[in-house]
Image (cartoon, rainbow, N blue to C red):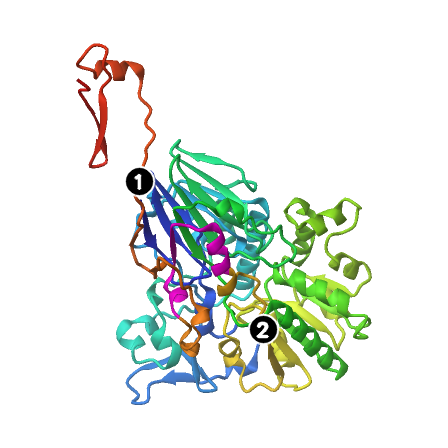
């Protein structure tokens, strides 16, 4: 058995392929969106500032890419539709993949690229919340791109001879020729039509050789870890898990015991930040800004942490005298996201399930909406423009600050020091996100909230479930470069974990001890050379042979 191909270098956006018992299984298909930080923002309203940025010319004047690259505050950005870094698709014939197992909705964003352009004919397995919220995030992404189309497509800067002469992050960008524009809504619908829904602990047979089963991972609505097992071997896939008490069902740890191999991905990206402490900082900075007469901008995804932020604010608003402050949630899928969070009762933690049967809404944002303290809109156009009042708090996307309604508010509020932008999503460097808006007067606060397992928690978990071998991204086997002295920010296990990186091929240390074989009686009898004696079954070079038992 092999963990054959590692197709992603991003530890929290994994895409691995496991070959196990004659089946080929893809584990997640995350989309690395950090590549969009190399592009200029897409403004919903014409931006004189962005349109007047000077084009880039090399210092010696030999390379002129004024139409493709623009300079802003000492940085250079690509002036075209943002593109994404896909999982590596050239190493493996993806038409040979039998199934794709999805762990959570953030780890399925590359699905249309895989299912619609590679000859894939298999089945995708995911829980219902993962499918439905994943659909919302994909539809939102498509909407962000299609409502601000850019005719020009920048390609010259990707030439290897030119790229190595470019400044900053463009020079170091990896596999730029493989970057792709966003998929279409038609491709999203086609990809998601291939998804088959599963419930926690439901066992799915794959060709009679392998059984897969999702377990609650405790990270988000419907998020899963996966058990992949045959009659005598067991692989656990742990991706994006949390032991904190938030809104999802708690993590199922006991089912991970007795694993021959445990594949570990999706640990917290901010191991030194405490989520509760970050929530406290978020609320206090928000209150200070509103009291001073400023506005607060919160770039966020349309599902996930925003539910916890709204719940925290629900408890905080009255004590902080913010009862008259309007809160706006702006997204093409805002209404659907808020509704979905209330109807997936069986996927929630026990306390929230109990509220459903009272009956009460499990999330307090329902009350915020009923009392008009929270209003949601599909975009800044239409009703929002007539009902908008300041000072206020706006939750909107995209966290990269490269597209979506957030671009409009950056242009609108960026020139005033009364206003504050609070970053809560950990996926993007906030300094890189802000780069094309410099010089900026508005205050910036970094409160990343990442509830996924940290190194202390995962070390304790691994001691309890005791897998024989652990496989993980190489980033987890060494401290961060900026904190090389912090040995507590890495995995130290015995035996040491097996690290992998993008494009690596890994042979798992998996020794097959037993095998179950089904033999027809007539085959068994015809193979025996001596009456009354059964033949001997032997195994050699992946094949079975009958020998004379005499």
Q: How many marks?
A: 2
160 sits to left or right of 11: left
x then y, percent, for residue 421: 62, 77
Q: Which residue is drawn at 50% across and 64% down?
A: 456
Q: Residue at x 68, y 70 (%)?
A: 394
x then y, percent, for residue 166: 34, 80
- Is residue 108 visible to the viewer in this orientation of the structure? no
The residue tagged 1 is: 512
On the image, which quarter does residue 498 sit in? bottom left
Classify mark 2: residues with Cα within 10 Å, few (<14), some (14-19) or many (20+).
Answer: many
Q: Where are the magenta residues, as a range? A: 458-478
Front in this rendered view, residue 337 or 140: 337
Relative to 96, say whether 395 is above or below.
below
Q: Please, which residue is most extreme toward the bottom here?
A: 60
Relative to 438, say whether 507 is above or below.
above
Secondary structure under badge 2?
helix
On the image, which quarter does residue 440 sit in? bottom right
x then y, percent, for residue 441: 61, 87
x then y, percent, for residue 275: 61, 68
- Mark 2 or 1: in front is 1
Classify mark 1: residues with Cα within 10 Å, few (<14), some (14-19) or many (20+).
Answer: few
Secondary structure under badge 1?
loop
Front in this rendered view, residue 253 or 205: 253
Quadrant of the frame with the C terminus: top left
Magenta segment includes 469:
yes
Relative to 525, say whether 297 is above or below.
below
Quadrant of the frame with the N terminus: top left
- Is residue 211 visible to the viewer in this orientation of the structure? yes
Q: Of the numbered discs in the image, which one, if any, rests on residue 407?
A: 2
On the image, which quarter does residue 517 sit in? top left
């Amino acid at each position: 058995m092999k963990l054959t191909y590692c197709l992603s270098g991003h530890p929290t956006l994994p895409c691995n392929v496991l070959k196990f018992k004659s089946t080929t299984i893809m584990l997640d298909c995350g989309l690395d969106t950090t590549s969009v930080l190399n592009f200029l923002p897409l403004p919903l309203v014409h931006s004189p500032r962005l349109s007047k940025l000077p084009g880039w010319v090399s210092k010696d004047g030999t390379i002129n890419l004024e139409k493709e690259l623009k300079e802003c505050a000492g940085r250079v950005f690509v002036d075209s539709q943002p593109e994404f870094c896909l999982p590596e698709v050239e190493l493996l014939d993806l038409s040979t993949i039998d199934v794709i197992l999805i762990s959570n909705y953030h780890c399925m964003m590359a699905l249309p690229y895989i299912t619609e352009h590679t000859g894939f004919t298999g089945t995708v397995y995911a829980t219902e919340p993962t499918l439905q919220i994943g659909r919302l995030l994909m539809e939102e992404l498509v909407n962000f791109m299609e409502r601000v189309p850019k005719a020009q497509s920048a390609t010259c800067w990707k030439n290897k001879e030119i790229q190595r002469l470019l400044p900053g992050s463009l020079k170091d960008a990896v596999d730029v020729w493989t970057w792709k524009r966003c998929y279409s809504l038609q491709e999203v619908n086609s990809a998601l039509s291939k998804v088959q829904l599963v419930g926690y602990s439901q066992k799915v047979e794959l060709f009679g050789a392998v059984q897969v089963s999702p377990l609650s991972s405790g990270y988000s609505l419907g998020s899963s870890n996966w058990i992949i097992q045959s009659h005598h071997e067991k692989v656990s896939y742990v991706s994006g898990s949390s032991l904190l008490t938030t809104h999802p069902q708690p993590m199922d740890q006991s089912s991970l015991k007795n694993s021959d191999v445990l594949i570990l991905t999706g640990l917290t990206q901010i191991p030194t930040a405490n989520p509760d402490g970050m929530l406290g900082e978020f609320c206090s900075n928000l209150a200070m800004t509103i009291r001073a007469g400023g506005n607060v901008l919160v770039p966020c995804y349309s599902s996930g942490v925003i539910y916890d932020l709204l719940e925290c604010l629900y408890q905080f608003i009255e004590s902080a005298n913010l009862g008259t402050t309007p809160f706006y949630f702006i997204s093409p899928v805002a209404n659907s996201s808020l509704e979905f969070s209330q109807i997936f009762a069986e996927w929630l933690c026990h306390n929230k399930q109990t509220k459903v049967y009272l009956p009460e809404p499990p999330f307090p944002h329902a009350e915020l909406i009923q009392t008009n303290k929270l209003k949601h809109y599909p975009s800044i156009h239409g009703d929002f423009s007539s009902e908008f009042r300041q000072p206020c708090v706006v939750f909107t996307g995209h966290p990269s600050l490269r597209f979506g309604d957030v671009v409009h508010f950056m242009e609108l509020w960026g020139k005033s020091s009364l206003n504050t932008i609070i970053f809560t999503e950990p996926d993007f460097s906030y300094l890189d996100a802000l780069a094309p808006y410099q010089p900026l007067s508005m205050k910036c606060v970094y409160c990343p909230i990442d509830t996924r397992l940290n190194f202390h928690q995962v070390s304790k978990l691994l001691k309890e479930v005791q897998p024989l071998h652990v496989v993980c991204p190489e980033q987890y086997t060494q401290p961060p470069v900026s904190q090389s002295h912090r040995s507590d920010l890495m995995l130290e296990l015995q035996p040491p974990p097996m690290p992998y990186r993008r494009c690596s091929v890994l042979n798992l240390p998996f020794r097959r001890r037993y095998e179950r074989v089904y033999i027809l009686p007539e085959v068994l009898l015809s193979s025996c050379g001596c009456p009354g004696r059964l033949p001997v079954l032997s195994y050699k070079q992946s094949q079975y042979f009958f020998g004379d038992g005499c």
